[in-house]
Amino acid sequence: MDKQLQDLVKISNIVGVDSSLVQGGGGNTSVKSDDGKYMYIKASGTALKDMNSKRGWRRLKKDAVLDILADKSLAKMKVKARELAMVKRLLAAGDDNVRSNVRPSVECPMHAVLEECVIHLHAITVQAYTSAKNGKAEILRLFKNEPTPPLWIPYANPGFELGHKVFSLVSRYTKKYGRKPGVLFMQKHGLLVTADTAEGALRLVRKVIRRCRAGLGKAKRVNRPAVSKKQIEECKRNVARALFETTGAKTEVVFCLNPTIKRFLAEKNPGQMLRCGALTPDELAFLNGPILWLNDAKYETVEAKIRKALKTDQSRPTAFVIRNVGLFIATEPALVPVARDVATGSLFVRRNARNMGGINALTGKQRDFIKKWEAEQFRVQLAAKGLNAKKSPRR
């Protein structure tokens, strides 16, 4: 196994087992060859923790990836056609023995413009800042004593637009500081760290997470009244029945309660923190939109809330938070773990972002792009089919 592939698998597995850093098939990693001609990068929809020497990655010709950013004709295309064209270009850039229909991460272009080793995480500790109205100011304050500051990336639609924005801002940063940024915070998205070695990138991840966590302060311990099994079962029945009556979908409902959910429920006006809608692409992809707040779990209450959501969001709700009870997930079994992690992470992010000037959620226009984005639909389909760990992409 090539040293670069070995490094890619190593860093992917290390960060991938921590659901506070990545959820499901989210996040991606890359390592470039010593001669700079190639880059190994995570395959789209693959869980980082499941990557190994035989599956979960593609090797691409780096120049072919950079050519995508240099092609001005792509920027003039309509969005749907442009994103599909980029997927085809990335597949054509492949130089390996992997099946050609195993897609490299759609975020290859932004990896190509950074250092040898890149780690992109949807870390909830970081998202607390990137989804806060005053998040940029807080990040600059936390890292003000660094010799070279982190780079803040204003929101851009994932895919081609984000790659171009990273390319532009990294070029500007390099001219100013004489080197590429080591840490990039992407608004409403997550974290990018880049270094010349795998160990250096991992050290940087630990440093950033440690400092961001310290900036949030220590979470208080919360004691909540116990919820009876009878109450939980009643909530599950009413949610399942309401979903069936409003959408025709028969769905198993799973109950979740952990310290993060308890802290959210203990906040003043917790329902208010959910009214702003989805925060990240992951929320839209795996939760079908915003988490629904329910003051009680009476059937009539649940049904009315779902009908209202369907009128405004046009997607079947997946996550519900019921006052004084907990979180309920209603989706197909293969997606329950990632939906639970995304929803729990969202509650953590909202609670902390509210303390930094307020929650900065996705706008309607941003939500519409992600809902129609083929690459995100592809990623969710892979997770639902359980392809990440079960099928090898090798011939």
Image (cartoon, rainbow, N blue to C red):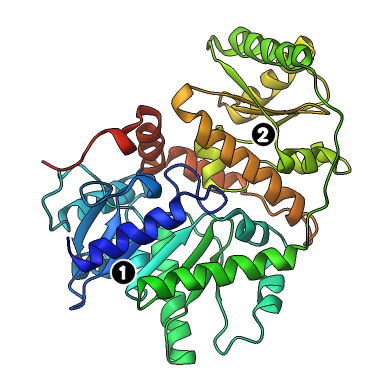
Residue 22: where, in percent of width, then height? 50, 50
Q: Nearer the viewer, residue 390 or 79?
A: 390
Residue at (53, 10) in percent of width and height:
250
Q: Nearer the viewer, residue 37 or 134?
A: 37
Q: Which residue is mark 2?
A: 291
Can residue 350 be seen here?
Answer: yes
Q: Which mark is residue 203?
A: none
> Which is nearer the N-term, disc 2 or disc 1?
1
Residue 319 in which image quadrant: top right
- The secondary element bearing badge 2 is classed as loop
Q: Amino acid at mark 1?
A: Ala
Whether residue 65 is situated above or below residue 292 in the rendered picture: below
Whether residue 126 is situated above or below residue 167 in the rendered picture: above
Q: Amino acid at mark 2?
A: Ile
Residue 237: where, in percent of width, then height? 67, 10
Q: Are marks 2 and 1 in contact (CB under 8 Å)?
A: no
Whether residue 68 is situated above or below residue 89 in the rendered picture: below
User: Which quarter shows the C terminus?
Assistant: top left
Residue at (55, 48) in percent of width and height:
366
Q: Which mark is residue 112?
A: 1
Whether residue 148 is situated above or below residue 135 in the rendered picture: below
Residue 1: where, in percent of width, then height? 17, 60
